[in-house]
Image (cartoon, rainbow, N blue to C red):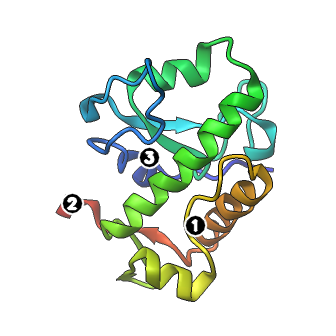
Amino acid sequence: MTPYRNRALLNLAKGMPCQFRIQGICNGNPETTVACHANWQQFGKGKGIKASDWAMAHGCAACHTWLDSSDAPDEEKLRTFLPAALKSYTALIELGRLINNGCALSSTEYASLYGSYRPAATEDVDNLVFELGNVAFMLATGRLSVANTSRY
């Protein structure tokens, strides 16, 4: 399967707060925030292939390094990544940077259209993966798209 690519979506991370906020690691500097890709096969990651662009979370340089290079257990990284990804999408929706059929929508409006949109308990990995998959489906099918970024 070809990974989903969307440069405009990745560019929205610039200047956003880090959503990982890992105690003792996070630098808290939004000037270093980037879209951190997931590092697991279920999100399109393969040998020499980044995960799909929808499988991202906003992270500062220090948290990004932790995600990509630390020897923390994979399970711990996944349990940290998933809530960060959903918090990243929640922030983008609430700022009007992701739109539905050309219109901005709040997280409350999102929930009324598509069901729950709030990060679940971090121990509920299956639910977090399901919610992130819902976002992925909407981006891939055009039901959710990046707003005109020239306004920001």
Q: State left or right for residue 101 relative to residue 138.
A: left
Q: Position of residue 71 (x, y in %)?
A: 68, 11
The amino acid on which the numbered mark 1 sits, given as a three-letter code, is: Leu
Q: Residue furthest left?
A: 151
How far separated are the C-alphas under marks 2 and 3?
14 Å
Task: Check the picture and name the quadrant holding the C terminus.
Answer: bottom left
The amino acid on which the numbered mark 3 sits, given as a three-letter code, is: Leu
Q: Position of residue 52 (x, y in %)?
A: 65, 46
The amino acid on which the numbered mark 2 sits, given as a three-letter code, is: Ser
Q: Quadrant of residue 60?
A: top left
Can I make out residue 46 in this image? yes
**In the depicted view, which residue is nearer to us: 4 or 116?**
116
Q: Earlier in the sequence, mark 2 or mark 3?
A: 3
Mark 3 residue crowding within 10 angstroms, few (<14) / some (14–19) / many (20+): some
**In the depicted view, which residue is nearer to us: 47 or 40?**
40
Residue 10: mark in rendering = 3
Residue at mark 2: 150
Residue 139: mark in rendering = 1
Q: State left or right for residue 37 relative to residue 24.
A: right
Residue 73: mark in rendering = none
